[in-house]
Image (cartoon, helix red, strand yellow):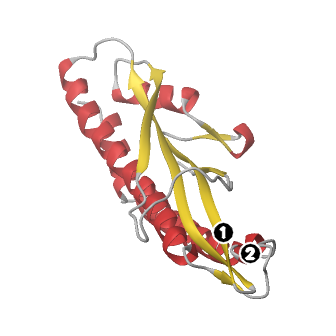
Amino acid sequence: MTRALIFGVSALLLFTLPAHADVRAKEVVKTYSISGKTGLELYQSIGARGPRLRGGLSSAIALTEFDLKWGRDYKRDGNDCVLAVVRPFLTITYTLPKPKGKLPPKLAERWRVFIAGIRDHEKVHGQYVAEMAQEIYDTTLGFRQKNDPNCKKIRSGIQAPLKDAFARYKARNSSFEQAEMASGGNIHQLILELVEQR
């Protein structure tokens, strides 16, 4: 369940937002097909068909990816350049397993509990992405680059808050993932309850 990242920055001169805005994400849910008549078979199918990570060396149960782009308007203020308008474009994509065919009733109930827990887990990753985007918005809007009348240096000047916000996102994401996947953690328990023979 490692995150994948697509992070784009663009300067667009199309629309304007108010001085403060909440970053809103478009959410997309994709599924991949799995099969099995027992919890163990479903879990094995997840291992065989799940999203590939680390260059295909391992797989995940589910995956949260995001595409974050920015529209920015820069304005000269005396000899300085100010980032006057910031427009975020954020898409968060969740990839989840989905059994093909009807499951036996007891297994169907266990699956409902399992997938609800996995969905909730991925939503936390999505929340961290949205919070990172909001932090970037809040810390870059109004950014002032001294001695930049042609608004050239400001583009590299705003990279520090971008990198800082992304570093904090990665740290939170990693800490959450480790806790959830640890022995006795939430994901570990969901897997045990799914594969339990009953």
Q: Residues within 10 Å of mark 2 (few under 14, many from 20)?
A: many
Q: Identify the residue shown where x is 58% and y is 66%.
A: 170
**Amino acid type, residue under disc 1 in the picture:** Tyr
Mark 1: few, some, or many residues within 10 Å (few <14, many ≥20)?
many
Mark 2 lies on residue: 154
Q: Where 89 falls versus 176 (above or below)?
A: above
- Between the residue at mark 2 and the residue at mark 1, the CA separation in whole angstroms equals 9 Å
Give the x, y percent position of residue 186: 34, 55
Identity, as a three-letter code, of the amino acid under mark 2:
Ile
Tell me where residue 17 sits by quadrant: bottom left
Say if mark 2 contacts mark 1, CB within 8 Å: yes
Task: Kindly state the secondary structure of the residue where label 2 is placed.
Answer: helix
Q: Residue at x 34, y 11 (%)?
A: 101
Which image quarter: residue 140? bottom right
Residue at 40 percent across and 53 percent down: it is 24
**Position in image of residue 172 (x %, y %):** 50, 69
For marks 2 and 1, give the one nearer the viewer: 1
Asked whether residue 8 appears in the rendered view, the answer is: yes
Which of these two is toward me, 31 or 158? 158
Look at the image and tell me in which quarter the C terminus lies. top left
Total marks shown come to 2
Q: Residue at x 28, y 41 (%)?
A: 116
* Residue indicated by mark 1: 74
Residue 67 percent coordinates (x, y): 58, 47
Residue 182 shows up from this direction: no
Mark 1, secondary structure of its residue: strand
In this picture, residue 160 sits left or right of residue 24 = right
Residue 191, by quadrant, is top left
Q: Tell me the number on the disc at residue 28.
A: none
List the single residue furthest toward the top. Answer: 101
Depicted 142 relative to depicted 176: above or below: below
Residue 108 in the image: state x and y as whole percent. 24, 25
